[in-house]
Image (cartoon, coloured by chain):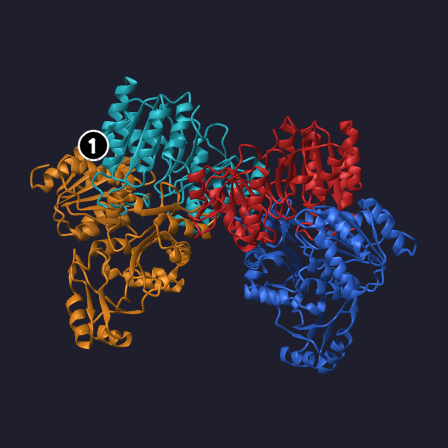
Chain colours: A red, B cyan, C orange, D blue
Amino acid sequence: MAVLIDNDTKLVVSGITGREGTFHALNNKSYGTNVVAGVTPGKGGQDVEGIPVFNTFRDAVAQTGANVAMVFVPPRFAADSILEAADAGIPLVICITEGIPAHDELRVYTHLQRTGTRLVGPNCPGILSPGKANVGIIPASFFKEGNVGVVSRSGTLTYKIGNTLAQAGFGNSSIVGIGGDPVPGTSFIDVIELFQADDQTELIVLSGEIGGDAEERAADYIAEHVTKPVVAYIAGFTAPPGKTMGHAGAIVSGSKGTAVAKAEALEAKGVRVGRTPTEVAEIAVEILGG
Amino acid sequence: MAVLIDNDTKLVVSGITGREGTFHALNNKSYGTNVVAGVTPGKGGQDVEGIPVFNTFRDAVAQTGANVAMVFVPPRFAADSILEAADAGIPLVICITEGIPAHDELRVYTHLQRTGTRLVGPNCPGILSPGKANVGIIPASFFKEGNVGVVSRSGTLTYKIGNTLAQAGFGNSSIVGIGGDPVPGTSFIDVIELFQADDQTELIVLSGEIGGDAEERAADYIAEHVTKPVVAYIAGFTAPPGKTMGHAGAIVSGSKGTAVAKAEALEAKGVRVGRTPTEVAEIAVEILGG
Amino acid sequence: MDLLEYQGKQLFARHGIPVPDGRPARTVDEAVAAAKEIGFPCAVKAQVKIGGRGKAGGIKIANDEDEARAASDAILGMDIKGFTVHEVWIETAAPQIESEYYASIVFDRGAKAPLIMLSTQGGMDIEEVADSNPDAIATLHVDPLLGFQDFHGRRLAFEAGIDADLVRPVGAFLHQLYGTFIAEEALLVEVNPLIVTPERKVAALDAKVTLDDNALFRHPDNANLRDPSDEDPQEQMAHERGLTYVKLDGDIGILGNGAGLVMSTLDVVAHYGGAPANFLDAGGGSKAEAITSAVEVILSDDKVKAVLFNIFGGITRCDEVANGLIEAFKTLDPKVPFVVRLDGTNDVEGRKILADASLPNVHTAATMDEAAQKVVALAKGEAA
Amino acid sequence: MDLLEYQGKQLFARHGIPVPDGRPARTVDEAVAAAKEIGFPCAVKAQVKIGGRGKAGGIKIANDEDEARAASDAILGMDIKGFTVHEVWIETAAPQIESEYYASIVFDRGAKAPLIMLSTQGGMDIEEVADSNPDAIATLHVDPLLGFQDFHGRRLAFEAGIDADLVRPVGAFLHQLYGTFIAEEALLVEVNPLIVTPERKVAALDAKVTLDDNALFRHPDNANLRDPSDEDPQEQMAHERGLTYVKLDGDIGILGNGAGLVMSTLDVVAHYGGAPANFLDAGGGSKAEAITSAVEVILSDDKVKAVLFNIFGGITRCDEVANGLIEAFKTLDPKVPFVVRLDGTNDVEGRKILADASLPNVHTAATMDEAAQKVVALAKGEAA
């Protein structure tokens, strides 16, 4: 089954004519993702190696039936692009762009809550459903199809965990990067809910980090609603308060958002927390009986 | 049964310490409405003939369990008062105030669509459920309990129609004034849906007027969803285009919003339209077999 | 409240929307002085709240001082579809025009959101375009809480088929127009034509703005734009007295309480063959004094041959209405017949007061239909 | 980006928030001149981005020129909790104060909405109030699309127990504070204390403002407030090179790609008993040049005794990283040992490049744990 993206995905890429946009759109396409369109205002009618480019999302949807959007435009244009995709009725928007102003994210989040569109990201590596579709910048070659669902705030760390699992013989249903920004469009809880309902997924790996209280909320949710085993990892035990550790959202404010508090919250609800990425993989292997 | 207000109504009145607010709050109370509180910022702790006054809606709700708000403050404060009532979790707000700026109404309407609060009005006479509760300025003495539900954009005209029915021996389940403003919080359709579901109501009277397309939309809704008989009246056949006929919403714009178009739309969907208030009452009597 | 073209343009300019430079003038001398300041050639444009002034000769180009004098002399005082021209607007003559677009934002009651419309078919009556070629108009509703987004401008511009190089400037123009619509609490802002110059700049060559009267308390500068000399004398008198009055074409004066009831009364009168002279809502809780005042407004229209009072007492008490009518007869001594129908709160008392006063030529009626029939007969000079 | 008190107050003043008059000064002479302009008594306040400066002697009242000179001489250059005072703010001495309130707006990530807090317990550390007397703080989330409404101010003021006559002015103050928060795209605006004068006026006696770095492109004036002299020299160097670097207390330099992986690397190093000297994310798609540049930043911290490279190649290619390291060794000739762990895209190529180059004192590791253990040993002077 996988979650969010699969063989039915028809992808439209905003910013497809930019250097990075072209590279990753083609990369996703070569993986097998059905990339049906690109959007770049003023370049409607052109194409990028056979992928037709439209001036607006509405045109792209009308002409191609696109049902997932990937946003790859610079930060100052990203909020507008997400809102345009939602306005065009696209139910899933995946925003890779890093560095979007926080107030833009707040306005977009609040508005999308009132529409039928789900946002994944911003500042995320995208989603990979191995063997089905890859939307974003996750290097797909390290992952194979399997029964472990991964949801993560960070990119490279996710690859690391996924790769360790793959070396232990396990594959993934889907890998969902929700991004490292203060206001992610999709939360741990949202994705865990999807994995819980997904036939293919037998184990859920949650990769969190310092800042905010998304992991604590997820712990409560897991205790109440999740029957599948969950293994967690939290990065940032050594992060000092008040410093932004790379991700805009990764900051300990006063005594809030520490890795210790998050790990304790998860363990209090019966979620096993690995202290290193290797340990996470080991716990997963133990649970799945590899 | 009645709709919207009944014996379970616990009313809080915003602007209760104003001259009109006091008069109508006490008038509603003397009818039997359970008026539990008033709100006037800075006058918390006082009372109006035994009705306790609070500084905020939240205090009023916390202390009295108020579940319906009536807003009776001047136009420049009305939007704020409605939003405050909604913020306090009150599910039904009835706004009598006339002359609220149209853009205020738009903001309030859009916001309330996203909350659990229903607004009736603004610029409406309120709601009367004869024998149960009266909230607003409808002169209750002309009406008795019965099986005719009335929904109307105008006040006095409603009294006129209700009175004519009463003289013919018929009473009302509820009389709902939705108000004469361009952006009413509750539409004909909303109230008709309630009447359709209400056991007490056997006939629905819709009293419309020029401006907008609410009557046309109601006609479509009635054809699809309403099994009870509906009789309609439309005021403003002689109104010239471009002139606001008293109600801010009563204006024919170009060829849009004419009484002829509305009557035709209703008749096309099988709704009988009386050409005078008397004729409406006659049709109602005929249908109900009075 | 509708603004004159130049008032709308001054509003636009305050919000950064490009408009041609201009000056208003109320006399020929002022107009000539303004023209000299603006420079030649300039346009002399009649300022009236009605369309079609160009065809009516209300817009002339002046190439020098003499032409400016002649043009303003011809236009000031001109009658355009019943509107007298009290003011002209002297404006830099339109720069060379490459294209004429249409842009507007209306307060869409049905959708409960601002509706933006954009078309490349500018300079024409947009209702004609809507009828003959609806696809030529791109439309979009803006979520009132989210507000205008850049993509709205792009979507409209691309859908309207505007040249690629103008997508951005037209989008920016619409953004400013939306800002004006919101900041000034307008019910309509319309630019027709929105011109494109050979330099590929856009500007508003006309401006039609309707403001929300209910919001004027927040916009004192706009409130001052109301020009009483523009209004019908009866409407002006009613406005000063806080009455809701609309002048109509007929000869039967109407007074009622509540907008719906008054509209209904007009309809019933028309139904029986009469022609109402006015809409007058004396309002909820009308006191005797308001009634007297209202009668004075109705009678100041000398076309009125008979008057109908249709009162359904709710908050309004019929005895108060009766007393107001008696007071009006004392001070105004009306020469035309009245038909009075009182129903609702204190109707018995009201009818008794009237009967006791036995005013000359005042008839009563038990129902709205009877009252309408009587007043129609009286207006025709027949017996009630 | 955190602003200094006076920068925050100048921001407030631009949005109509009442603040005491003041001038910034970087030298004693400037400070004395500013004090004469402001008038006596005045306050001389150390400008540092850390709380508790009052207790540390960083705020003094000056009653005349000599005292102003002495105060600014004492404060300028003072060390407050590791922050050197480069600037003072000379301010009209606080008017008589009747009450001290607390007001703030924070960007609440959990609730995904601005959170307003108001308390009558001003002048204290608000976290202490929150712990000891949480009911003393009134809180409210604002819907970001609806914005601040008048009732928000009333609700907060009444719930905080503010005197009835101050409900309106405090509400207006909060409205302006919210306006500032939104217009400047702040992540935090805090006023502690918000004072009430005997004339029952309110004003901001302190200002703590954090702006969103990601939004500075829309606020060029604010972007100019960044003071590089304030930053740690390594952080400044990294910032100029577009690298994400955070200085830490230890002696093991860390370089990785991706914020999560770098945080994880720090944790694993600490897990094995090491102390990281920094967080450095070379970013996605790191090229050789960026790696060289990053090594230079790490080595410029002379506490560093060993360096760990932990790369998981995704977009980043391990061969590029290896080449960058070789280039760094050529130009920088580092004296400390390196441990390099390459995994992911082109890891085989990268490892081969490193092996062929046989750089002095560069060790490799197959796993993150092994790499961490090695670098900890090397930093302690043990064999890897």
Question: Which of the image's four quarters has the N terminus of chain D?
Answer: bottom right
Query: In the displayed structure, would residue D237 be above or below residue A197?
Result: below
Image position, residue A226 (x, y; %): 68, 29
Query: In the displayed structure, would residue D72 be above or below residue D151?
Result: below
Quick check: can you spot residue B14?
no
Residue A60 falls in image quadrant: top left
Residue C79 falls in image quadrant: bottom left
Taking depth in this image into account, of D308 and B208 the one nearest to the observer is: D308
Residue found 34% across the figure and 41% down from its top? B180
Quick check: can you spot residue C2?
yes
Image position, residue D356 (x, y; %): 79, 54
Q: Is mark 1 on a helix, strand or loop?
A: loop
Question: Is D3 placed left or right of B75 in the picture?
Answer: right
Image position, residue A180 (x, y; %): 66, 47
Taking depth in this image into account, of B51 and A4 the one nearest to the observer is: A4
Taking depth in this image into account, of B6 and D113 the one nearest to the observer is: D113
Binning the other alpha carbons within 10 Å of mark 1 as few (below 14), some (14 to 19) or many (20 upward) gives few
- Residue at image mark 1: C366
Residue A234 falls in image quadrant: top right
* Amino acid type at mark 1: Ala
Question: Is B248 placed left or right of D288 in the picture?
Answer: left
**Mark 1 belongs to chain:** C
Image position, residue B169 (x, y; %): 30, 22
Taking depth in this image into account, of C88 and D367 the one nearest to the observer is: D367
Q: For the view shown, which residue lies furthest in the top direction?
A: B289
